[in-house]
Image: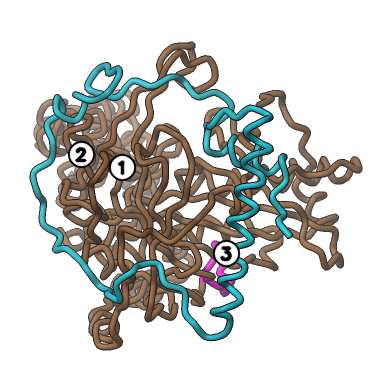
Chain colours: A cyan, B brown
């Protein structure tokens, strides 16, 4: 059955930067398990030569020409930012990574 | 993140004990007019956050659209690498949280890269050729630029906060990934640098990138692992990032070989991780542990439809491919008449482009070679810079060479003029005037100096009359000294011999 362990849920929550309680971990492990199992069931039905789709409509090669279009102004770009400085978005220093 | 000095094994010893395997990931920033998925301008050095829009700063509801030119450039790169072009390619989201991308994911390609399975032949400085197999070339977007504020190093450790400029976010990149490269041996570091040099020449020749390493148009991550000779299993690799000059690539690979060898020889294990290259201290330091591909939770980008380049389109681009770097090298060597050794030195010093420009601007090939591989390269080396970072142009070198050729200045003066050009004093001709460097060819002034010198060495004329022409040397030396090097030595010699004949 499901391979979704509480540890895996905690790992995923960490990657997604979401704080979860132990209670939520137990609940999410169960829920994610159901989802994974359901997908596995569907996969059985389409086993073989059915190509994977990532888009509901069968279309390809939607492209735009390499032509410059107006950008936002710096003021507009920064208008929704919680904090800014010197024309840049200001964010908390992220330690442990570079 | 220890910055303690790592123990290194002597390079020769490391190679005796271990086999070196490298793998290279090169990011090419394309020079399209606009970004990969939006119409914002792709320009270096603009005011921060002025080339941004809802798409590249990830505002809700915005939808990306692929830049046709970027796809063409990527296909051209794939073809030049001898790759197959995928008839059906897709974009994927690579999910990670870091403020250099506002969307919380990077649009990239995962299981369906646009180009795969190629190979190129790379010549190393010794003249040996290696075949480097290309695993794939895929398209992705660049990230924004972070500036860390606070602390005292400008680096992230100790920073209080960071400032983000998204002008670069969404700029198209092509990442070229090699298969593991075996057999480089002692030349593995040179091979890594030669490979990146060749890729750089290639994309420049294709016209798809400005290929300026100092601007980050070409960036290299170097994977290095070592294993005892005869062992089949590959060693644990490290991925060194931030190696942004050809010289640093060579140094970083060499350093990692020596560092890993010292650890393994002591019975230790190599940690799989990214490492950072520090040009200033010539060392790598530990970065974050390498994430599993799984942790990026790649999934097909639902906002973009597949890219399916038709066979006709691919063939059209193939027909437009310019001369390949290897062919270009052959042609230039022949045109310039350089010996194999001369030409190899030019290539390995990365001076083919400036010499080509200088010759095109009117210099003789040997004169162009002499200045670029000689004094200019020497100065770059002394200042720990790439030649391209020096402020001297091809037309400066042409002017300099002409001044020497016409006898206006000698080599010593030319070197002084060069120093002036690099210091921003102006064009060579101007500097000759400003610094009063012109050679004195006025016979009156020269004769006065010669007579003064002869007065101190009265027996010289007699010796010359006896056929001992070398006696003139002492007088020439005295004249040059008296005229502070501005005399034309050949003319001085002629005049002394004339005096002896009088």
**Chain identity of mark 2:** B
* Foreground of the two, A3 or B401: A3
Name the disc covering residue B269, or none: none
Q: Quadrant of the C terminus of chain B?
A: top left
**Is residue A8 positioned above or below B75 on the image?**
above
**Is residue B275 positioned above or below B84 on the image?**
above
* Of labels 3 and 2, the one closer to you: 3
Residue B3 vs residue B234: left or right? left
Image location (x, y in percent) of residue A4: 69, 50
User: Label 2 belongs to which residue?
Assistant: B52
Please indicate, yes or no, whether residue B278 appears anywhere in the rendered image. Answer: yes
**Is residue A80 positioned above or below B158 on the image?**
below
Please indicate, yes or no, whether residue B334 appears anywhere in the rendered image. Answer: no
User: Label 3 belongs to which residue?
Assistant: A39
**What's the residue at 33%, 40% (across, down)?**
B462
Q: Are marks 3 and 2 on the same chain?
A: no
* Foreground of the two, B501 or B446: B446
Image location (x, y in percent) of residue B190: 58, 56
Q: Are marks 1 and 3 on the same chain?
A: no
Lower sequence index among marks 2 and 1: 2
User: Label 1 belongs to which residue?
Assistant: B169
Asked if labels 1 and 2 touch by Cβ distance under 8 angstroms, the answer is yes
Q: Secondary structure at mark 3?
A: helix
Q: Secondary structure at mark 2?
A: loop
**Chain identity of mark 1:** B
Q: Which residues fall within the magenta stretch?
A: B122-134
**What's the residue at 42%, 72% (across, down)?**
A53
Q: Secondary structure at mark 1?
A: loop
Residue B493 vs residue B224: left or right? left
Neighbours of disc 3 within 10 Å: few (<14), some (14-19), many (20+): few
């Amino acid at each position: 059955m499901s391979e979704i362990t509480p540890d895996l849920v905690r790992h995923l929550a960490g990657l997604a930067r979401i704080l979860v309680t132990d209670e939520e971990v137990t609940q999410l492990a169960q829920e994610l398990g159901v989802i994974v199992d359901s997908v596995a069931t569907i996969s059985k039905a389409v086993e073989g030569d059915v190509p994977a789709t990532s888009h509901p409509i069968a279309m390809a090669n939607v492209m735009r020409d390499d032509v410059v279009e107006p950008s936002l102004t710096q003021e507009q770009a920064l208008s929704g930012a919680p904090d800014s400085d010197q024309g840049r978005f200001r964010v908390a220093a992220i330690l442990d990574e570079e | 993140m220890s910055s303690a000095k790592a123990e290194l094994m002597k390079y020769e010893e490391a190679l005796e004990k271990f086999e070196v395997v490298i793998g290279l990931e090169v990011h090419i920033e394309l020079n399209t007019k606009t970004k990969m998925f939006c119409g914002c301008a792709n320009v270096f050095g603009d005011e921060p956050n002025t080339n941004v829009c809802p798409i590249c700063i990830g505002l809700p509801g915005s939808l990306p659209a692929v830049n046709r030119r970027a796809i063409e450039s990527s296909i051209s790169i794939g073809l030049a690498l001898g790759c197959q072009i995928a008839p059906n390619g897709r974009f994927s989201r690579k999910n990670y949280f870091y403020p250099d991308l506002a969307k919380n994911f990077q649009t990239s390609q995962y299981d369906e890269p646009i180009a795969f399975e190629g190979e190129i032949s790379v010549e190393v400085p010794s003249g040996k050729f290696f075949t480097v197999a290309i695993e794939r070339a895929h398209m992705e977007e660049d990230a924004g630029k972070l500036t860390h504020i606070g602390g005292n190093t400008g680096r992230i450790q100790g920073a209080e906060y960071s400032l983000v400029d998204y002008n670069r976010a969404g700029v198209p990149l092509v990442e070229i990934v090699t298969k593991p490269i075996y057999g480089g041996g002692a030349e593995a570091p040179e091979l890594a640098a030669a490979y990146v040099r060749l890729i750089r020449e290639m994309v420049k020749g294709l016209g798809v990138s400005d290929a300026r390493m100092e601007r980050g148009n070409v960036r290299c991550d170097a994977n290095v692992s070592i294993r005892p000779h005869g062992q089949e299993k590959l060693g644990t690799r490290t991925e060194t990032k931030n190696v942004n000059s050809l010289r640093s690539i060579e140094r970083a690979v060499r350093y990692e070989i020596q560092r890993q060898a010292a650890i393994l020889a002591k019975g230790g294990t190599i940690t799989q991780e990214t490492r950072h290259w520090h040009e200033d201290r010539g060392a790598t330091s530990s970065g974050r542990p390498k994430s599993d591909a799984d942790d990026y939770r790649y999934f097909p980008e639902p906002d973009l439809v597949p890219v399916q380049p038709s066979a006709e389109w691919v063939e059209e681009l193939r027909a437009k491919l310019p001369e390949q770097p290897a062919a270009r090298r052959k042609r230039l060597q022949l045109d310039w008449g350089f010996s194999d050794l001369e030409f190899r030195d030019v290539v390995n010093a990365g001076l083919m482009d400036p010499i080509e420009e200088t010759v095109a601007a009117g210099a003789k090939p040997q004169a162009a070679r002499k200045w670029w591989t000689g004094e200019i390269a020497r100065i770059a080396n002394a200042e720990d810079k790439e030649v391209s970072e020096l402020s001297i142009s091809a037309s400066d070198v042409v002017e300099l060479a002409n001044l020497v050729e016409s006898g206006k200045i000698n080599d010593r003066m030319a070197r002084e003029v060069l120093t002036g050009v690099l210091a921003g004093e102006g064009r060579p001709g101007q500097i000759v005037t400003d610094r009063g460097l012109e050679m004195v060819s006025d016979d009156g002034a020269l004769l006065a100096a010669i007579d003064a010198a002869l007065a101190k060495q009265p027996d010289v004329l007699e010796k010359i009359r006896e056929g001992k022409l070398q006696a003139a040397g002492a007088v020439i030396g005295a004249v040059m000294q008296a005229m502070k090097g501005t005399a034309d030595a050949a003319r001085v010699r002629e005049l002394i011999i004339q005096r002896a004949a009088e």
